[in-house]
Amino acid sequence: MAAPGITAPVNIAFAQYCEAIFELAEDDFDVIQARIAERLGVSRPAVSEMMRRLEHEGFVAVRVDRKIVLTDAGRSLAERTVRRHRLAERMLTDLLGLSWAEAHLEAARWEGVISPTVEAAIDRVLGGPTTCPHGNPIPGSDYAAPNTVSLSEVLVGAKFQVVRIPEELEFTAGLLHFLESAAVTPGNTGLVTASSPDGTLTLEMDGRHVGIGAFAAERIMVMLDA
């Protein structure tokens, strides 16, 4: 069943842009053209042209402060695209054994070709997952947000459980591979053993010590282990 306000087939580029806008907003960014360009790796003039097209088609609205928001139709398209991307990531890691980084790249190719029938089948086979492998919520699932803080807020000597690696870090070159190899993955528990003045944290994960820079520590979401 097509999302409300969307006729099929949908322009793949429209879906990619709406997905990027949705994910930037999900990570609490003010969505402006420069951030969309950076996220998608395209030029600002290309983004400007696409915003005109998306606004004309009723998928986005540009506010007077130049911030970009999704309309109801744009959000519906974005949620459908994000849902299929995150279900594909879950299938690629859980069933096919791909790494985080591989699954993220492959899912970007799959999201535009998964039909509603296949989407429902993936969801059924996986048992109705509520998050992608990185802990980000799957739209349309029964996800309930836990109480979390950023890893940077955890004091030395405190234990934590990793909950979520936000989309911004998924797009940081090499970081997914590093975090996966260091066992900084949702569900794993760790201990902050040291903190540097520059914000770098030293963690003990699975009996190993690993350093996490301030950029990542401020964005990784965890639950404090009581």
Image (cartoon, rainbow, N blue to C red):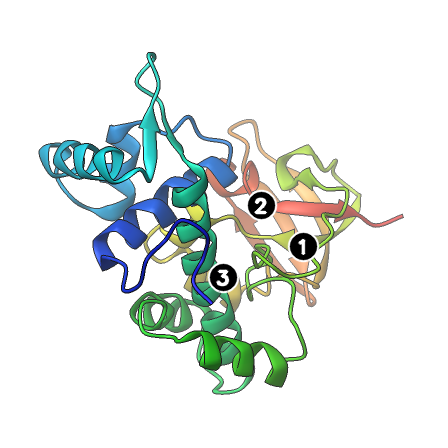
> Which one is earlier in the sequence, the residue at label 1 or at label 3?
3
| Between marks 1 and 3 in the image, the one whose residue lies nearer the viewer | 3
Residue placed under numbered mark 2 in the picture: 220
Give x and y (percent) for residue 135.
60, 58
Residue type (three-letter) at the residue carrying disc 3:
Arg
Point out the frontmost of discs 3 and 2.
3
The quarter of the picture where residue 134 lies is: bottom right
Amino acid carrying label 1: it is Val
Camera-nearest residue between 40 and 66: 66
Which residue is situated farthest in the right direction here? 226
Circle 3 residue: 83
Q: Indicate the secondary structure of the residue bearing disc 3.
A: helix
Instruction: Name the one closer to the observer, 65 or 161.
Output: 65
Q: Disc 3 versus disc 2: distance between alpha carbons?
A: 21 Å
Observer able to see residue 92? no
Residue type at the position of mark 2 = Ile
What crowding class fits label 1: few (fewer than 14 Cα within 10 Å), some (14-19), or many (20 or more)? many
The image's mark for residue 162 is 1
Q: Position of residue 7 (x, y in %)?
A: 32, 57
